[in-house]
Amino acid sequence: MALKIAEIVNADTEGRAYGRPPAISDEELVRVGPGTKGGELLRRYWQPFALSEEATSQPKHVDILGERLVLFRNGHGEAGLLYPRCMHRGTDLIYGKVEQGGLRCCYHGWQFDPQGRCLEIPTEKNENLRNKVRQPWYPIVEKFGLLFTYMGPEDCEPGFPSFSIEDDLGASERIVSYRSDTGPNGPFPKVAAAGDYNWFQMYDNWMDPFHVCVLHYTINGPQFSPSLGIIPEVKFEKTDDGVISIQKRRPSEGPVQQRISQVIMPNMNCTAGVSDDDLGSAGIGWTVPSDDTHYTLFGLMRVDTDLKKTPFSVDIPMLDDHWGPTHGKPFSQWSLEDHQQWQTDYVAQKGQGDISLHSEEHLMAGDKGTALSRRCFREQAEKVVNGEHPVGAEPGKSYRVEILAGNALLDEKTGACIAGIASRT
Ligand code: FES
Ligand SMILES: [Fe+2]
């Protein structure tokens, strides 16, 4: 009898793994280097790449959009971002010495200021020679404790944007910036991960509200506040510069919990807090590719210092109850078995591969937000190819980045907002 079942099962010829089509990545989404379609779009915007405090008199390498650069801060306090191969004979400027005016190459002592101007060639008597050379450089804007750079064509450089998060700051409020190399769930130290896979796998996630009630709840118990475990009704809408998801969760009693999440082209996101009492507006974040297989998250949050609430001070007590075999271990020491017992965004996204294979995907209705945000990204990238300016990146003009995301409570009968931030209901 058992043999017969085996025969029947094996008689089904559909869907076998043998002979499946070759799997490929979506190159438009995943490549970030110079000359790639996505990379050229990302280069049309000011991108955060380091905390202010990372620019010091000790040069350091930074990888941004597939380019390795060297960051330093000269004696006048000005940060510089240079191509690292010295234009004289190619020594890496990481070994240089920072002086008052700039960074001096260790080999023959050419000194470059933050804009790549050569200030001195110690072995040349002719002063004019140094004016004929320029070390390749990128401009920097330093704001909110972050360093931003623009890596696109100079005649397309937009003004530095303004952000609605800056509006009407109260006396006790301030904007706090952060950098996280730890990827999704990273702010919570016990589940810190790494951004060691393609940036678009992270970016897809910002417009994927349905994974929250599965990965973060039913798979291994609640990782965020209880209300987020309810399967939401979701409406996705295109905005002028991206996509929002309007999520409504209806508890058995009490007000409707509304959560609006947002992506802004090409790589920004606005994601509200994950605790039930966090009814404020969202902060703003950037998923910045370091190269094709690494990224870093940067962000800004509005903090009321009187409340002594820092961006990542949210207490999530349920984490301890589900700590299981990983208890006390730093993330880097988790075994495969630990990851199989306590899954995070990290394994879900890293599990897609270092660079996902999009030809094998089967997107369903629940993936509408992800599909919309990819479409937006492609449309803007196509504009660049056609010689147009992508949204929010008009040369010389400052774009206003409007945060629509936030958490709110809605009256269950009338749908009216009774607490929190609701740019839409
Ligand atoms: S290689 Fe840098 S000064 Fe000669
Ligand atoms: Fe997640």
Image (cartoon, rainbow, N blue to C red):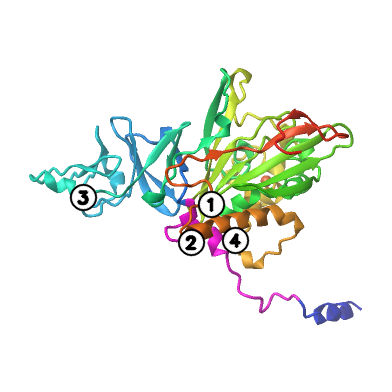
Residue range of the region highlighted in magenta in the rendering: 15-42
The residue carrying mark 4 is 356
From the image, state whether disc 1 or disc 4 is nearer to you.
Answer: 4
Query: What residue appears at the point 51 percent right and 58 percent down from the top-left corner?
Result: 383
Q: Is residue 295 left or right of residue 2?
A: left
Q: From mark 1 to mark 4, how far is it between C-alphas?
A: 12 Å
The image's mark for residue 386 is 2
What residue is drawn where x is 81% and y is 79%?
Answer: 12
Q: Position of residue 74 (x, y in %)?
A: 29, 34
Figure quadrant of residue 21 = bottom right
Q: Nearer the viewer, residue 25 or 243?
A: 243
- In the rendered structure, which amino acid carries the disc numbered 4? Ser
The location of residue 298, given as percent across then percent down, is 53, 40
Residue 31: in magenta span: yes
Where's the C terminus, which quadrant? top right
- 153 relative to 275 in the view: left or right: left
Helix, strand or loop at mark 3: loop
**Of pointers 1 and 3, the one earlier in the residue sequence:** 3
- Which label lies toward us, 2 or 3? 2
Q: Earlier in the sequence, mark 4 or mark 2?
A: 4
Determine whether, in the image, residue 313 is placed left or right of residue 63: right
Residue behind mark 3: 133
Residue 149, by quadrant, is top left
Sequence order check, earlier mark of 2 and 1: 1
Q: Which residue is mark 1?
A: 196
Q: Residue furthest left?
A: 125
Disc 4 from disc 2: Cα separation: 27 Å
